[in-house]
């Protein structure tokens, strides 16, 4: 299984042609002006107010622009982000994750195709065989039940095992909704699968557009954090 990782490459210094960046998240007073999925020229002047945060994606990765100020997305060092079959360098997400069988933990799913069993959401998939069930805290064993359309499968999830394959008995299908439950859970987690077109490894913009269009918010969070440009600390351009 291919995992999402960051590979920062030093550019040659040549002048790049004007390209576009993709808005993947916006919060704050100006958020309505920057809907997720909007394309911006990488030399555009972006004016943000106080408390605005704008996350953009291009071939270098994701960057967060924080207001107040005027910014140019192209102002970051030249880098590249790729998909590769290698162990990712995980980044912690802010906020508690309700764990399966133990205390809360903070973690990031190892790939876009590892589905956090504690979070209800739409789940985008390219290949059903690559879908994995994942938990942030694997300190204790548990029994996870996957149910849909009158069918169910209960899996024994061993202590120390953070990921387990989605059961073939209840295979993920486009448009189908599944309930995930385990002993001690306050309520079942609900996931609905959305089939998206296959992409080439480096086509992060196309992957992000699919996640945005199908409202696969958990996977979009994973992409944003894992593909973040190292040393991301955008400052106003003037």
Image (cartoon, rainbow, N blue to C red):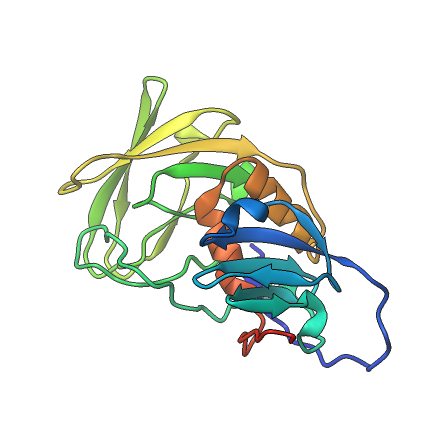
Q: Is residue 9 left or right of residue 218?
A: right
Tell me what residue is drawn at x 82 percent, y 82 percent: 13
Is residue 113 shown to the viewer in this render? no
Whole-percent x and y of residue 97? 28, 55
Tell me what residue is drawn at x 54 percent, y 58 percent: 54
Above/below status of 203 relative to 86: above
Is 90 in front, or is 34?
A: 34
Tell me what residue is drawn at x 58 percent, y 71 percent: 229
Q: Is residue 226 left or right of residue 18?
A: left
The quadrant the C terminus occupies is bottom right
Whole-percent x and y of residue 186? 16, 39
How many numbered markers are drawn?
0
Is residue 55 shown to the viewer in this render? yes
Q: Is residue 206 left or right of residue 146?
A: right
Q: Is residue 226 left or right of residue 120?
A: right
Above/below status of 145 relative to 98: above
């Amino acid at each position: 299984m291919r995992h999402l990782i960051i590979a920062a490459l030093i550019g040659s210094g040549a002048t790049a042609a004007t390209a576009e960046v993709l808005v993947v998240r916006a919060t704050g007073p100006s958020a309505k002006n920057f809907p997720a999925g909007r394309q911006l020229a990488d030399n555009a002047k972006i004016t943000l107010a106080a408390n605005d945060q704008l996350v953009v994606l291009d071939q270098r990765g994701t960057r967060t622009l924080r207001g107040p100020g005027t910014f140019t997305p192209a102002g970051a060092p030249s880098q590249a982000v790729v998909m590769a079959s290698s162990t990712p360098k995980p980044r912690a997400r802010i906020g508690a994750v309700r764990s399966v069988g133990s205390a809360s933990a903070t973690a990031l799913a190892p790939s876009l195709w590892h589905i956090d069993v504690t979070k209800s959401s739409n789940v985008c998939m390219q290949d059903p065989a690559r879908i994995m069930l994942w938990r942030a805290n694997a300190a204790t064993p548990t029994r996870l039940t996957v149910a849909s359309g009158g069918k169910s499968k209960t899996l024994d999830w061993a202590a120390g095992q953070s990921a387990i394959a989605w059961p073939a008995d209840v295979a993920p299908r486009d448009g189908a909704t599944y309930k995930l439950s385990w002993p001690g859970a306050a309520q079942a987690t609900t996931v609905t699968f959305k089939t998206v077109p296959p992409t080439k490894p480096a086509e992060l913009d196309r992957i992000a557009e699919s996640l945005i269009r199908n409202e696969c918010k958990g996977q979009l969070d994973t992409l944003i954090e894992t593909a973040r440009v190292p040393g991301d600390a955008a400052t106003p351009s003037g």
